[in-house]
Amino acid sequence: MNIFEKIEKGSDDIVFVYTICGDVEEARSLGFSAVQEKLAISMDYWIINSIYPWKNVIQEVDQYMLIFSTQNNLSDKLIKHIESEHSYKIPMVAMCKTDMTNLPYSLWVDETLKDGQRYITESELQDKGDINSLRNLK
């Protein structure tokens, strides 16, 4: 099978969940908590410029765009997590389905999210003094 062939669609299809927030600390917090709780396999974020009305005044502000990669069967839980942890009174959260994801990546996501083992951060690994595991990460 060509790794770029479409695989059968199902509940474990990769989807993207999108939101924005006001600062990098919140972006990182939302990303770490979603990945830690295995609601997402990853979260990418970057600074953006936004223009929108709020209380009848047009706002132009810097914000952070967040794109979470997850499986379709986890998207509702992820969206609820984002809504409950978000600092905005009315956060925008949207989900986009994918037409195709290459097979090796899809298999890795499936295996990684199903594993019941808790993730640890690199700093937790350093605190444990596990030098060999740190070397294997690179």
Image: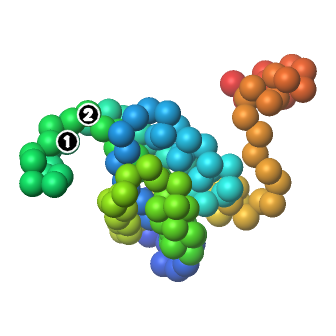
Q: Please report the residue visible at 75 percent of the width from the left and 45 percent of the height from the top.
A: 119
Q: Residue 97: x percent and y percent? A: 38, 68
Determine the CA span between mark 1 and mark 2.
Answer: 6 Å
Kind of residue at badge 1: Ser
Can residue 8 be seen in this snapshot? no
**Of residues 21 and 136, which is closer to you in this image?**
21
**Between disc 1 and disc 2, whose residue precedes?**
1
User: To which residue does mark 1 refer?
Assistant: 50
Residue 81 on image: x %, y % = 55, 62
Tell me if residue 87 comes above or below residue 15 in the rendering.
Answer: above
Helix, strand or loop at label 1? It is strand
Is 44 drawn above or below residue 62 in the view shown? below
Three-letter code for the amino acid on which mark 2 is drawn: Asp
Q: Residues within 10 Å of mark 1 (few under 14, many from 20)?
A: few
Residue 6: x percent and y percent?
Answer: 44, 69
The type of colouring in the image is: rainbow
